[in-house]
Image (tube, grey):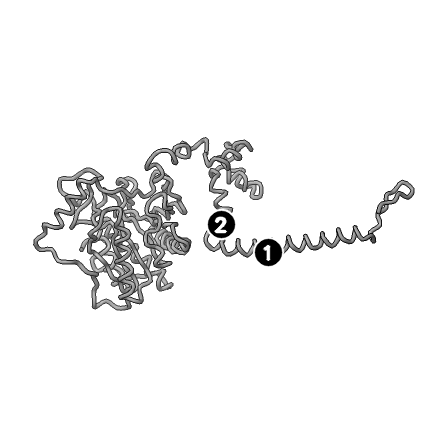
Amino acid sequence: MRNRYRGFTTVNMSTPRVRQLFVLLILGTAVIFILTGLFAMVQAERSAHSSDLGKITAHFSTETLLYWMGGEIPYLSSMKAIADKEPRFSRMFFELMTSVDPQDPRSFLGSELPGFALFDTEIVVAGEGVDYTSVPIESPPPPDLEQKLKESEKKKEDHEEKKEEKDDSAPGKDRVFIYHTHFTESYLPELKNSDQPNRAYDNEKNITKVGTRLGKSLEKLGIGSRVSTEGYDAEWNRLYQASRKRAVAAMKEYEDLSYLIDVHRDSQRRNKTTKKIDGENYARIAFVVGTAHKNWEKNEQFALKLHKKLDELYPGLSKGVFRKSRAMGNGEYNQSLSPQSVLVEIGGVDNTFQETYRTADALARAIAEIHFQATPVDAQPKGGEDGQGD
């Protein structure tokens, strides 16, 4: 009840109506706190997988994000590249609503052109000189070549079923399973009468040799490994299902397996896939993480460890870590089977076995150092650093 006294309005706080309002206000505040607490709990559980803030900021270009962050970190806004591109509010709002960056043509066309989404691979961390033109590209062979490969495989007179290979004299339990989903991927310099990138495939001279080299290098460093070099009787678009069965069977047979390495060959050309280190050419390596399962962030952390270790040991060898969703390919890549599972692209269509073997040795050393969490491994492959050997 309100009363006026000498020009002031007074309120009687003891009336039943005011008391009811206070009770409702207190109860409403309590309900808001309870709902906020429940929402925070749900968000805390979801944050173990991904950040909603990250989904929002994904709509903005790098320059826009850095400009915003510059409000709290002045150094960022003082960077010439950002200062010269001071974004307007209209541009920020446009990017948020449409996911289109006016200065990036890819953002206009990515969802409209068939196959263009392949170039929307997310770069988690980029290696030396890597940008969106350097991301790993996964391309199938032409249909006629795939049929020829199948016919060639059937005509082999001395064909024997290949099993998981292992040097039984090597120490340690079997920790690493190495397999090859696209087992016919090869390298043009190793093939005769072929100079077309989309025909760098072969039933014998292929990526399985690189995986075998990786397994032998791991064994020499004290880490037991199994290498599957057997092919799959499946269509190209069913190969990941086939290789998953192979990986599951191996994990059941060898209970100590904790690392799953799927070895591939990139479709990029030589200038994007080669690095000279200490006078020797190496095939650059890329780590691909699929996000089409709930625990993908654990795989990404493993890939980041490998990238960081390789960058310490062989600067510039790793192209980085790349994230792919279901829309950009398989999206899962059998990585839900183990938190220490990763797809690696070793070299491109123009690299040689010698170059890829050097990289396989380097990757083995990185895995060993991470596995043992010890001082740098000094053991060298018996075949030498020159990549000679099988």
Label 2 secondary element: loop
Q: Is residue 319 left or right of residue 46?
A: left
- State the residue at coordinates (12%, 58%): 160
**Quarter of the rendering containing residue 146:** top left
| Mark 2 vs 1, N-terminal side | 1
Please name the residue that numbered disc 1 is placed on: 37
Q: Decide if residue 226 is on the left or right side of residue 158.
A: right
Indicate the position of residue 278 as horizontal and vertical percent values. 28, 49
- Is 30 displayed left or right of 374 in the figure? right
Q: Label 2 sits on what residue type?
A: Ser
Q: SS of the residue at dot 1?
A: helix
Q: Nearer the viewer, mark 2 or mark 1?
A: 1
Any part of residue 3 in sight: yes
- Whole-percent x, y for residue 259 in the image: 32, 60
- Number of dots carrying numbers: 2
Q: Nearer the viewer, residue 146 or 343?
A: 146
Q: Amino acid at mark 1?
A: Gly
**Would you call the spot at circle 1 few (<14 residues within 10 Å), some (14-19), or many (20 or more)?**
few
Q: Please say whether residue 222 is visible from this viewpoint.
A: no
**Residue carrying label 2:** 51
